[in-house]
């Protein structure tokens, strides 16, 4: 790897870490960069995933204040992210990419629709709960199933995992968008960590360690920046960022 190539990977890691903290889809920066530099798709994906674990941890820590009071959400959803990540990572190493990637653009479109409609859906859900005289007791079956599916997707590829989680959880949980974003960061960290460990166990030689190191350093820097930027965005602006990132993700995936 030449110095210009190393710098490109490092800067891609910074960009990915920043955008992952704000919404997700940072993989759509690092993964194409690695492909452009000549790395094989599986090597690029595995190395990218392991490197981004460190940025995910930084982003989750940066949003720790918004996680306060969400212990029930974390306890119920984190194990599903764990299980989904294992399944997705094994699928990546065992199956061809074409079958799974065919549905990815559709999933992102659904997530973007949920993000746009999230305020109305949340208001409707709260009103129905109030009329029924019930209280929120934690994530329901729909949130659990969605988290499991997002975990499988995140373990397999990871791009726009955050968009899927924010769109789905924002519509199903009575939390503000910033608090949903904090939960998304923690669940994404779980998925990335579990997938990375699975990669190392199932195929330990799949990673390129210089790439892992550069992406890791860059994503940690980006995670710190993203946590500061993302927290300051009002809900409307954050929702707009999510939609733009999601649309870019669709274009990237369809053109790849």
Image: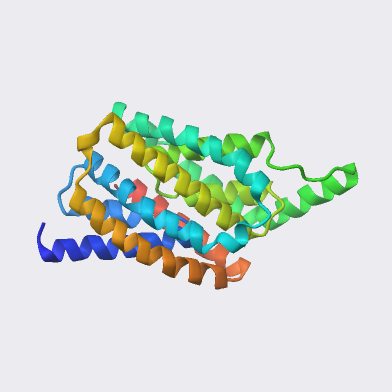
Q: Quadrant of the image for the N terminus?
A: bottom left
Q: How is the image coloured?
A: rainbow
Please name the residue shown 88% across and 42% down the image: 132
Q: Nearer the viewer, residue 251 or 179?
A: 179
Name the outermost residue toward the top: 94
Q: Nearer the viewer, residue 246 or 72?
A: 72
In-image side of 217 versus 192 (left or right)? left
Q: Nearer the viewer, residue 47 or 34?
A: 47
The image position of residue 51, as x and y in percent, is 31, 52
The image position of residue 244, as x and y in percent, is 47, 61
Please name the residue shown 16% across and 54% down the image: 37
Q: Nearer the viewer, residue 45 or 191?
A: 191
Can residue 233 be seen by looking at this rendering? yes
Please name the residue shown 52% across and 51% down the image: 186
Please name the residue shown 34% across and 41% down the image: 196
In-image side of 228 versus 205 (left or right)? right
The image position of residue 193, as x and y in percent, is 40, 44
Name the outermost residue toward the left: 2
Res 6 → quadrant: bottom left
Res 11 → quadrant: bottom left
Q: How many marks?
A: 0
């Amino acid at each position: 790897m030449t110095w210009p190539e190393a710098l490109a990977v490092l800067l891609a890691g910074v960009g990915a870490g920043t955008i992952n903290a704000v919404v997700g889809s940072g993989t759509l920066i690092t993964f194409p960069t690695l492909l452009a530099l000549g790395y094989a798709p599986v090597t690029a994906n595995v190395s990218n995933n392991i490197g981004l674990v460190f940025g995910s941890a930084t982003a989750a820590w940066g949003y720790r204040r918004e996680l306060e009071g969400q212990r029930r959400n974390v306890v119920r959803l984190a194990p599903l992210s764990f299980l989904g990540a294992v399944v997705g990572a094994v699928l990546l190493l065992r199956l061809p990419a074409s079958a799974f990637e065919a549905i990815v653009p559709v999933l992102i479109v659904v997530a973007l629709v949920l993000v746009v409609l999230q305020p109305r859906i949340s208001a409707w859900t709260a009103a129905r709960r109030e009329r029924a005289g019930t209280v929120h007791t934690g994530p329901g079956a729909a949130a659990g199933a969605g988290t499991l599916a997002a975990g499988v997707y995140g373990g397999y590829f990871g791009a726009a995992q955050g968009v899927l989680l924010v769109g789905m959880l924002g519509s199903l949980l009575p939390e503000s968008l910033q608090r949903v974003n904090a939960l998304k960061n923690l669940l994404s960290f779980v998925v990335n960590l579990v997938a990375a460990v699975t990669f190392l166990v199932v195929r330990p030689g799949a990673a390129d360690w210089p790439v892992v190191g550069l992406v890791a350093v860059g994503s940690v820097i980006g995670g710190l920046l993203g946590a500061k930027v993302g927290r300051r965005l009002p809900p409307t602006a954050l929702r707009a960022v999510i939609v733009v990132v999601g649309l870019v993700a669709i274009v990237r995936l369809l053109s790849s």
